[in-house]
Image (cartoon, grey):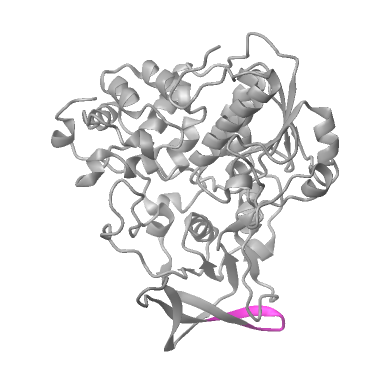
């Protein structure tokens, strides 16, 4: 695929970024587009590997060698058609996906992988610019209705597929505008909301209805919604945060990551006034959590004008290269630096928070101790404290970005009889069906907090199961890597 010797002739070009000081002065996206000739070269690096392991790495089953070949040959419209067969939201994955496909790229065995994620974005943006992305309402309607609870990635993917199959789809969103995590959890410097609104306008033109400001399980019951529709898809995400259970947690100045991120996203959108509790300007900020959410909070705090920002991770720093027990094509557990971490702030690893101190009810200090993994023979590694390694951070704003434990189910179990797993996620079978008839679940609500690409994949696969349930026969929706049958 591409040019057979391209990977030997052209190096991988990393994502081009705006200058750090420039991007810290606004909330616009930090990434820049590739020049068309450079995009051609990067696509041409896709080698004729015989067995494309990138397919194994991509939950959506994207036809990666095929669309790279099309770009290299200058057939951009064909590239978009190939990409959109399996991915209805390439402009999102091209910005937000951590690219497990690149980790599985055959080139990644001993060289730099093909820039697959960047190519998705380039193809999608070219398609919008050229006017190739147009509403495609279904040729017929089935007369069946489906309610989708939640408008994040899984809900949008399910809604798009079900609508394409001819069902009448209504998406219910608790917040004032649709998009879920994409709108309120992802900072604008990674995803400008005009990109999201552009796609939502296409979906509405295709016949999907969005009903916002509806708290399903609260003001509107799950039972009421199930009676209204022939089937339900639950896609509420996994918004229940992991808590910090230490003395001093009640002090003012301790906030959850999603509250912090939502506040800023709403400010940028002009949907609210500034809340001093959630403003890092002039304050010493500590972020507990070294993952993507913590990184997003770091970039947000820097743009708000924090006096200092320190990101603290419980686990030790990963190695710079793959360990022997982490071979290709598994996801490489290696040290990474995000765009936000490039912009500033300090990073600390292997620290366990022990207590918080303050004065007059306000947070002033975080006390932690260094930990290490004790790998005793014949047992699982245990985290143990290092004697005499206590550390204290002065802090005015502590942001908890320690991950999420599951969905906020409300009265789901009581009203529909939907069962939860022991870890609090919605229980589903292999076809995304819950224990309640006609009720399905997709994305983080059943999987647990995961990647956008898994949410999109789950949404598509759940839609296929719903379509089969409604039609009483095999679904007309596509399998991974195969175009639609209608």
Position of residue 444 in the picture relative to residue 319 (left or right): right
Which quadrant holds residue 114? top left
> From this viewpoint, which residue is outermost toward the top?
139
Q: Which residue is at a point 84% across and 40% down the rendered structure image?
A: 220
Query: Residue 248: x and y, percent?
Result: 66, 80
Front residue of this view, candidates 150 and 430: 430
Which quadrant holds residue 125? top left
Position of residue 295 in the picture relative to residue 425 (left or right): left
Q: Which residue is at a point 28% across and 52% down the rendered structure image?
A: 327
Q: Quadrant of the N terminus?
A: top left
> From this viewpoint, which residue is outermost toward the bottom?
388
Q: Is residue 480 magenta?
A: no
Q: Is residue 359 magenta?
A: yes
Front residue of this view, candidates 202 and 4: 4
Front residue of this view, candidates 248 and 108: 108
Query: Residue 103: x and y, percent?
Result: 33, 45
Query: Residue 428: x and y, percent?
Result: 64, 42
Query: Residue 33: x and y, percent?
Result: 37, 34
Position of residue 118 in the picture relative to residue 172 (left or right): left
Position of residue 6 in the picture relative to residue 312 (left or right): left
- For the stretch drawn in magenta, what is the main secondary structure? strand
Q: Which residue is at a point 46% across and 53% down the rendered structure image?
A: 24
Residue 96 in the image: above or below residue 207 = below
Q: Quadrant of the C terminus?
A: top right
The answer to whether residue 304 is visible is: yes
Residue 366 in the image: above or below residue 33 = below
State the count of labels: 0
Which quadrant holds residue 225? top right
The answer to whether residue 268 is visible is: no
> From this viewpoint, which residue is outermost toward the front?
378
Magenta range: 357-367
């Amino acid at each position: 695929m591409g040019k057979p010797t391209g990977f030997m002739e052209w190096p991988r070009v990393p994502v081009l970024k705006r200058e750090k000081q420039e991007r810290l002065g606004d909330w616009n996206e930090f990434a820049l587009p590739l020049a068309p000739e450079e995009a051609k070269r990067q696509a041409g690096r896709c080698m004729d590997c015989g067995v494309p392991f990138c397919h194994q790495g991509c939950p959506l089953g994207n036809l990666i060698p095929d669309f790279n070949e099309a770009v290299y040959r200058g057939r951009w419209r064909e590239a978009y058609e190939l990409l959109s067969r399996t991915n209805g939201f390439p402009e999102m994955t091209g910005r937000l996906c951590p690219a497990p496909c690149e980790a599985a790229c055959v080139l990644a065995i001993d060289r730099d992988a093909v820039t697959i994620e960047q190519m998705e974005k380039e193809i999608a943006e070219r398609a919008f610019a050229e006017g190739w992305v147009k509403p495609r309402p279904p040729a017929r309607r089935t007369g069946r209705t489906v309610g989708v609870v939640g408008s994040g990635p899984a809900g949008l993917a399910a809604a798009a597929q079900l609508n394409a199959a001819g069902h009448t789809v209504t998406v219910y969103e608790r917040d004032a505008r649709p998009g879920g995590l994409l709108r309120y959890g992802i900072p604008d410097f990674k995803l400008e909301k005009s990109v999201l609104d552009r796609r939502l306008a296409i979906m509405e033109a295709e016949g999907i209805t969005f009903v916002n400001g509806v708290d399903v399980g609260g003001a509107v019951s799950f039972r009421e919604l199930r009676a209204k529709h022939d089937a339900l898809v639950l896609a509420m995400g996994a918004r229940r945060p992991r808590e910090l259970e230490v003395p001093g947690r009640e002090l003012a100045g301790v906030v959850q990551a999603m509250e912090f991120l939502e506040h800023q996203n709403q400010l940028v959108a002009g949907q609210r006034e500034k809340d001093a509790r959630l403003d890092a300007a002039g304050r010493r900020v500590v972020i507990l959590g070294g993952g993507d959410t913590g990184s997003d909070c770091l970039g947000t705090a820097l743009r708000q004008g924090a006096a200092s920002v320190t990101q603290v991770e419980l686990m030790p720093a990963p190695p710079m290269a793959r360990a022997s027990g982490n071979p290709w094509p598994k996801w490489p557990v290696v040290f990474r630096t995000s765009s936000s971490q490039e912009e500033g702030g300090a990073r600390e690893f292997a620290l366990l928070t022990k207590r918080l101190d303050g004065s007059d009810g306000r947070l002033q200090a975080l006390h932690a101790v260094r930990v290490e993994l004790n790998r005793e023979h014949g047992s699982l590694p245990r985290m143990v404290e290092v004697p005499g390694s206590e550390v204290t951070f002065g802090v005015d704003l502590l942001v908890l970005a320690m991950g999420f434990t599951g969905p906020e189910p409300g009265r789901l179990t009581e009203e529909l009889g939907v069962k939860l797993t022991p870890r609090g996620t919605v229980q589903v079978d292999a076809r995304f069906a819950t224990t309640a008839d006609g009720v399905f679940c997709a994305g983080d609500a059943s999987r647990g907090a995961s990647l956008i690409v898994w949410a999109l994949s789950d949404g598509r696969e759940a839609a296929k199961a719903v379509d089969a349930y409604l039609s009483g026969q095999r679904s007309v929706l596509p399998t991974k890597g195969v175009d639609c049958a209608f």
